Amino acid sequence: QVASIEMIHNFLIKSWASGIKMESYSGRCENILATPLPYSSFTSSSVYARGYGAGYAKLNRKQGAGGWSPLDTDHYRWLQVDLGSRKQVVAIVTQGRYSSSDWVSKYRLLYSDTQKNWRPYLQDGNIWTFEGNVNSEGVVRHELQHPVQAHYIRFIPLDWSREGRIGLRLELYGCSYWADVVSFDGHSVISYRFRSKKMKIVKDVISLKFRTMAGDGVLLHGEGQQGDYISLELRRARLQLNINLGSNQYGSIQGHTSVTSGSLLDDDHWHSVVIERYRRNVNFTLDHHTQQFRTNGEFDHLDLDYEISFGGLPLSTKQSSGGRVNFVGCMEGITYNGENITNLVRRKKVDTSSFHNLTFSCMESNSFPVFFNSSSFLRLPGQTDSDSLSVSLSFRTWNPNGLLMFTALTDGWVEVAVTEGKVTVYMNVTQKNTRIDISSGSGLNDGQWHTVHVNALENYAMLTIDGDEASTVRTAIPIQIQTGGTYYFGGYFLHPNNRSPQHSFQGCMQMIHIDDHLADLRAVEQGHIGTFENVSLDMCAIIDRCVLNHCEHGGRCSQTWDTFSCNCSGTGYTGATCHTSMYQQSCEEYNHQGKSTGSYWIDPDGSGPIAPFRVSCEMTVENVWTTLKNNLPPQTSVINADQEGKAILQITYNVTDEQVLSVTNSAEYCEQYVAYTCRMSRLLNTPDGIPFTWWVGRANERHSYWGGSGPGIQKCSCGIEHNCTDPKHYCNCDADLRSWREDSGLLVYKDHLPVSQVVVGDKNRAGSEAKLTIGPLKCHGDRNYWNAASFTSPASYLHFPSVRGESSTDISFYFKTSSIHGVFLANLGTTSFLHIELRGSMVVFSFDVGSERVELSVHSPMPLNDNQWHRVEVEKNIKEVVLQLNRQYRDVRPTPPQGHTKQEFYSELYVGASSGQRGFLGCMRALKINGVIFDLEERAKAIPGVNPGCQGHCSSYGMHCRNGGKCVEQYNGYSCDCSLTAYDGPFCTDDVGGYFETGTVVRYDFLQEAGSFALREVKSLSGAGLPSGANLTREVLVFSFSTSSTPSILVYISSRTQDYLAVVLRHNGTLQIRYSLGGLTEPYTIDVDHRNMANGQPHSINLTRNLREIRLQLDHYPVSTYTLPEASDTQFNLVKSIFLGKVFETGQIDPILIERYNTPGFVGCLSRVQLNGMAPLKAALRSGVAAPISILGILVPSNCGASPLTISPMASASDPWHIEAAGVVFPFNEDRAIGNGVDRNFAIIGGIISMVIFTVLCIMVFVIRHTFRHKGSYHTNEAKGAESADCADAAIIVNDPAFSETIDESKKEWFI
């Protein structure tokens, strides 16, 4: 297709060259146009004095006064250049008046072929304002975005030197322009006959330029007897291309295609059209704006018979034209597939018999339009004291309201206005105190020309719209009127009698008649009659701001004279141009916003072309599932087999193929359940045979494996698992049994999903039956949402190629950092500047508007360097620029009209450091520009200073966070969050324990909260805890202890009923577990009789209950399983408190506990106490943790004889953070990093200091032990190795990595 388009363009260049000649002496269209012209070719509105004439306004000339200056310095001045003939102008250069304080700083450009009906130069949909000079000698050049062809050029100064006045010298660059012109009068048609009777054409290139004042007319037409046709015609001043490459007789293939372009094309200016077609691909270009489309149907050739006509329909088709009219106006440069049609007309090589008067020039129009802005009016004279009033005019506008005409009567006034799109006449008669209103028409603010005729004669008034007698409205008036003789048009003036003015009219008027006489507006321009203010004469600068519809995604465009607006309702998008999606990109994003399971709209490509669609989101603890449902009910009977015995079942989904692809492409995993239930209906046959049944997946690919199997393996899941009904077959159904069987399983190769069709092949035998189930497509994960990179150096960056946007640009990403400044993203190209950076608590977005730089900023009340994810969104469109942070804080600015281009091009796009600026330090993910995800992870793999993913060490070294500690990502390292564990320290390996004196009690009360309890809902150790009154069916109790004292209660969990759980040491040192959950007369007990646990050595207990099943593990002995009796309840009702060391509780307590085990209480060390994620002892020993804890007696923090778990140092070669993290204790902060230049000296000094500190700590340990000896404390340190253990328990414990190594130098027990 690309090659075909290039071929079309090459063909077009040859065709265009044959129809239009542009001559240049240099070979390029860069000739000097103004300087060679004589003095008389320059004219102006006025001249300041002799020597300041327009003829002196040539670049770098010093003759005369050194340039042109007008008599008056105001907005009505102009300088005009007669180029002698039509020229193509490509550039303009301006300069101030020589050696003066006079120059023009802003100006507009008008051009014309006839010195009438001037056309303003437009760029990006606006009347363009050129930036001029800032002094008298500097030269400012502007290349025209689109070259113009004109005979006359007019400069309109808008702003000028504050120290002087208007002063101008100029130059124009371009080349000669010539083309054959043919005039059409509405009856004339050019018929180009083909060399053969029928043409079967695969490619076409048609080009022409036209100029007209008619809103309707056929420009070209060709058709064939088989129904093919091509036509180009004006309809309501819009250009419509109709093409049909063929339809079939049954109507199943419809080839008609219609595309509309442009607006207001009846402005009597030249418009260029190019139609390029290769097979079904069409480029339709009008005035440099190209629409690309594919024709409907399935045919590639355009079959035309005999001829193609230009200017109207041939006589043979006139009768069936359906009211279509021929073209009235001029055409030039007509080419058809390399043939210069206008040249053939001039040489009389084509049929022009329908022309009564063939002319090769364009007739000048007699129209003289007047352009009104919001501060304009035109005053014209009429008859005075006449008893009749007659005013008519034509107008065009976009505004629903505006004053067209006002005139004062001898006794009252008359006003004609556009009101809500209709024309209303207000007549006020003062003598009778009477007001008469009549109105007609509707929707007249559509930009089209409309005529208004108002008559007031004798005793009635009459209003007619567009010459339609059916629209005429009449009304009686009480007295005969007398005119005042003065008529105001446009509305911007003070009404007599202090009346409040109507809305000023914004638009164009022409053909103004007063008292049935056409007003001579050229005489008004010359100052002979009437007066005006802020009116542009002989020009209608109306712009259709919706013709290039900037409302995206189906938004509906509406406009006034000054601006347009977009109605985005029902599109799924929002914003000034319906650019931004209203929905999140995936279920993953909804989940991270705290949403629960449900149905949601998602938009994976944001502002891209894929429309939002609805999916089911299932939020589970492990994954977030996206589900796409299909139309096939479960267990659908397979019927309607064809003659070959095949039944085809189509599977359709509630989304398009592109939408499905957007989900599967970004998903980490997808699955689809399939089941084939059969009776004498075989499924796959043998692995080497031809399958009976197959399914079709993505890209219409056929697959012959079934659920539970994989690509290339023609088996079912039972064949993989070797458990099929018949071992000789690899599917249950392939056994071909008369009883019902089923083959089912999951299809998990996501590049093949979803299933779109199933062909069942074994259905033509008697007794054969089958049922099919195709489950929904389910996917989890969103790789785009988590596509991330870590920037570890302020000089690191990722470089991406250029980014191009149409009329809007949007950028979004997430970031997290602990730094306070850095560049997120910057564009260093010369075409457009773009810059997003972090400045403290602000995010700043900068971009260029012309020569100025605009900056938007959003301030966050919360710190942005908190290592939490924050979202940045930027949108720049033709209407506004928006910067948004965290979907809460916004800065919005209107887009300056001079700062917008239709296509924005950003080259040299850098993510991170750029142009010597400090880059962003931290993690960035989900970078999306114009709906396209940028693959940060892939690009980061080969870039130093940038790591793929935002994972720090967690993906490779997260196992160092022990005992349930959570690895927390940081941009230059990681830290371990131990808040949900019973441990402490950098790696959650430090025991948190306490020594209990006689009578010491630790009590942890569960907070009273309504609602049920789920284990996964426990969030922290700081007191949220289990809700008081929760009912447990599962609990996990883990702790360690060491003691030599018996009996004692280690742990007791109470309730608001009589339910309890107790772990006690009996008098002989053995362990007993007591469960009382109700339903039994006595508590259920578990006695561990064969071990003495009060031997002064550390022991670990892991007790887990799930309903009736109880699992107990002591130290490293095998797990023992117990079962509660059937009579026992399984719910631990209304949990209240945890007691450690002793029970101190009111209410009914098991008397055996109190009498046998509660006195004198536990004496020894408890550590690592944890219940269902709660760590009561840790909460008691950490003063900074707010928790419902009470302590009775003395509790001394202790590691219970254990030293911290040793983690072998990481080799620098395997540590990607080695440079930044060397010698740093996690969590690491880059702002505290030490420069490399002094690391070595500090390391030596630090080593010496560390040795001193270690020695001091050893002495302190000895002193503390000595102190404990005199206080009656107990402390033990066991020797290393099983060989030094005095019992089997010790031999096992020393090999337990959960218990820390003992201290070498102490190989004996301390008894106090």
Image (spheres, grey):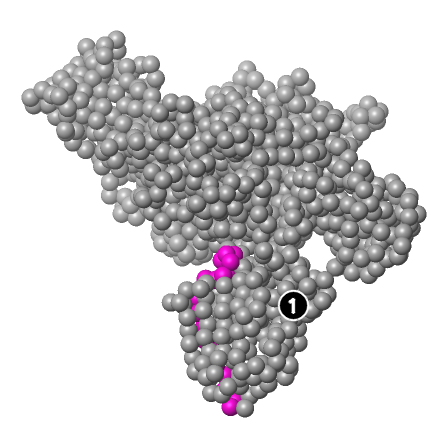
- In the orientation shown, which residue stands out farthest toward the top? 688
- In the orientation shown, which residue stands out farthest toward the right? 99
Residue at 84 percent of width and 26 percent of height? 1238
User: Residue 1248, located in which quarter of the rendered image?
Assistant: top right
Residue at 71 percent of width and 25 percent of height? 27
> Disc count in the image?
1
x then y, percent, for residue 1239: 81, 26
Check disc 1 and report the residue beneath it.
378
x then y, percent, for residue 886: 58, 48
Neighbourhood count class around disc 1 (C-alpha, 10 Å): few under 14, some 14–19, many 20 upward = many
Task: Please check the rendered image and state whether residue 443 is part of the magenta-colored stretch, yes or no.
Answer: yes
Image-based side of 700 in relation to 5, left or right: left
Image-based side of 163 in relation to 782, left or right: right
x then y, percent, for residue 1156: 42, 44
Which three-letter amino acid code belongs to the residue tagged 1?
Leu
Q: Of 560 and 41, which appears nearest the observer?
A: 41
Task: Please check the rendered image and state whether residue 554 is part of the magenta-colored stretch, yes or no.
Answer: no
State which region is magenta: 432-450
